Amino acid sequence: MAHRVCPPFIGYFLLNPLRRLIENPDRMFRGLVREGMTVLEPGCGMGYFTLPLARMVGASGRVVVVDIEPKMLAVLEKRATKAGLAERIERRLADVGGFKIADLAGKVDLAVAIHMVHEMPDQATFFAEIEKALSPGGKMLVIEPRGHVKQAEFGESLRIAKASGLVPLQEGSSVKARRLLLQKPAG
Ligand SMILES: C[S@@+](CC[C@H](N)C(=O)[O-])C[C@H]1O[C@@H](n2cnc3c(N)ncnc32)[C@H](O)[C@@H]1O
């Protein structure tokens, strides 16, 4: 599997407003996000999805973002401050050892991993960390780009996610992306 980390200049391209035509956050998160939720967004980049998520969870919710690239988090912070959403967004810098989210164990209602799973050098550790962070019944949305990630690779990610204890609820794909919705069993 390829795990080349997306360089920061790509982060700016990912903020292009025209992206909404293909990846509209309101449509993508419909039925998944409610006010007051704790959402975890690993590999958040410069926050194309983070700001809409922060609006959806409202003042009583929070979005915890984790990225390995400091520049991505720095731009995200500026954008969040400008939008008046910084207080709902907690930023964390990952390192090659992992996401440093042990303190979130059992507290996350929804994890959103968009166009980042194929960049993980060790998907078994990645899915295990997310599974631990999810509350019982909590969900994980995985979206991968069709161009970079072939069906066989996506199938391998699904196998690894299942091995970590997550249960697939829905699998699908569009012209541009492969999508998977997983759940941590409720009890
Ligand atoms: C293609 S970008 C997607 C960004 C964002 N999810 C979006 O769709 O706009 C992948 C992101 O994953 C981050 N990333 C790659 N490897 C990582 C790791 N080991 N831990 C945390 N973040 C990582 C990159 O820095 C980058 O911001």
Image (cartoon, rainbow, N blue to C red):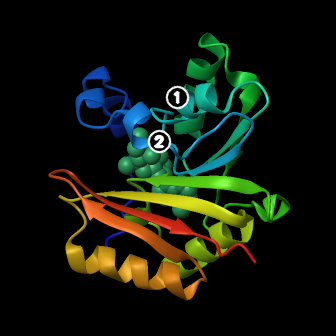
The disc label shown at residue 29, or none: 2
Q: Quadrant of residue 98?
A: bottom right
**Horizontal and vertical percent for residue 66?**
63, 49
Q: Is 136 drawn above or below residue 86 in the view shown?
A: below
Residue under the point 54% across and 47% down: 32
Q: Quadrant of residue 131?
A: bottom right
Q: Quadrant of the C terminus?
A: bottom right
Q: Are marks 1 and 2 in contact (CB under 8 Å)?
A: yes
**Horizontal and vertical percent for residue 40?**
64, 50
Tell me if 69 is positioned left or right of 187 in this view: left
Q: Is 113 drawn above or below residue 63 in the view shown?
A: below
Which amino acid is tagged 1?
Pro
Residue under the point 22% across and 74% down: 151
Q: Quadrant of the N terminus?
A: bottom left
Residue identifier under label 1: 52
Residue under the point 60% across and 78% down: 125
**Horizontal and vertical percent for residue 48?**
45, 32
Towards the viewer: 5 or 138: 138
